[in-house]
Image (cartoon, grey):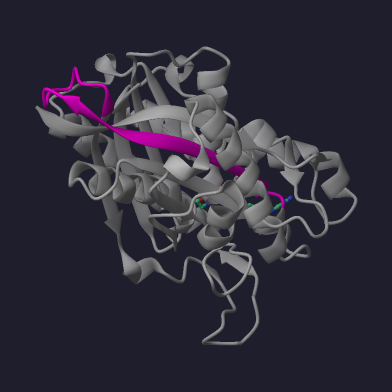
Amino acid sequence: MVLRSHIVGCGSYLPERVVTNQELAGRVDTTDEWIVERSGIRQRYLAAEGETTADLATIAAQRALTSAGISGSEVDLLVLATATPDHTFPATAAKVQGRIGMVGGAAFDLQAVCSGFIFALSVADNFIKTGQARTALVIGAETFSRILDWTDRGTCVLFGDGAGAVVLRAGRGKGTSEDRGILSTHLHSDGRHHDLLYVDGGPSTTQTTGFLRMEGKEVFRHAVTNLASVVGEALTANDLTPADIDWVVPHQANKRIIEGTARKLGFPLERMVMTVERHANTSAASVPLALCEAVTDGRIRDGQLVLLEAMGGGFTWGAGLVRM
Ligand code: UT7
């Protein structure tokens, strides 16, 4: 028998305010048609004034705990993936830890931008598999609206705010792909491309927060190649083929990236969970938001095989294979 991390609950939160493409077209030189055609995005949710990443993360975490039927005091590891923390320090995870009544264990932030949730899931899974944690909260939460240059039409139309969370619990398995829980995770980064998608500020450089800058076309090109490669790696590691996968929950950056990856790998589009048209790109929150939506509406069911994948600034990219 081997230790496995079972996903026993999930929760998510989207801010109240919905901003449509039409509304953005009143602010920058863009159109609903351009945004929909190039990205698939129709609207995004934006945090209210004063609403922070920790606020979004706390609600998602509380909902995940409720769905798992446990209290915060049972959690002994909290990993929060974000590129938009409340403060430079302490970690946003520490704020959330205090709010959910988690008193023991460790809470920390993890920064891998849009791949952050997959990286955090991998870290928590490894803590559980080595016996260092029994119950982990893994959160992806972002307020990207705070780091957008609202005069740059090439980026400001693409992102949104939100949070998603899962609860992992240590369980046992036979060590085969029939086991419940996280079967494997696969992480990569390539720092040679750090300046294709970055924020032009920070405590050690400008002492300002800065704004998101992106070479969209270049990022797009790398995204399809890297995602197809890491998904292939996850399938090979588990001796599986695309036909074995019930659902793919991809990072929601661009509908065309999701479609391109599906085509390259031979996944039918009906098995790709798609939220990008409503949520836009919520960075580290996008995968847990989409996962939680598909679990809650009954598409993803117990026993099914789910493949998670994401790619983001760094570059970073990764995949995780989970039997629910
Ligand atoms: O989370 C992971 C990181 N992010 C991504 O994965 C995003 C990856 N990249 C993309 O999704 C796409 O590259 C974009 C959606 C960002 C852009 O699509 P594109 O087909 O690569 O367009 P482009 O940047 O090459 O721009 C085409 C044209 C340009 O005009 P010219 O130079 O051809 O006259 C842009 O100035 O579209 C123009 N443009 C816009 N027009 C209307 C750029 N942004 C807009 C806009 N509205 N919002």
Does the image show residue 262? yes
149 vs 32: above or below = below
Q: Residue furthest right?
A: 26
Q: Quadrant of the C terminus?
A: top left
User: Is any atom of residue 252 visible in this view?
Assistant: no
- Magenta stretch containing residue 179, yes or no? yes
The image shows residue 133 at horizontal and vertical percentages of 29, 47
The magenta-colored residue range is 157-181
Q: Is residue 180 above or below residue 91?
A: above
Depth check: 114 or 59 in front? 59
Q: In percent of the image, x 76 and y 36: which residue is there?
A: 33
Look at 56% across and 29% down and name the residue there. 66
**Quarter of the view holding residue 174:** top left
Left or right of 132 on screen, residue 279: right
The x, y position of residue 126, in whole percent, is 24, 47
Q: Give the left or right position of residue 231, taking residue 12 as reference.
A: left
Q: Is residue 90 left or right of residue 134?
A: right
Q: Quadrant of residue 129?
A: top left
Kindly identify the residue that appears in the image at 48 percent across and 52 percent down: 114
Say whether residue 260 is magenta.
no
Q: Nearer the viewer, residue 135 or 202?
A: 135
In the rendering, at what x and y percent does residue 197 appear? 50, 64
Indicate the quadrant containing the N terminus: top left, top right, bottom left or bottom right. Answer: top left
Total marks shown come to: 0
Residue 244 left/right relative to 74: left
- Quadrant in the rendering for residue 239: top left
Residue 294 higher or lower than 204, as above or below: above
**Residue name at image x 26 percent, y 41 percent:** 185
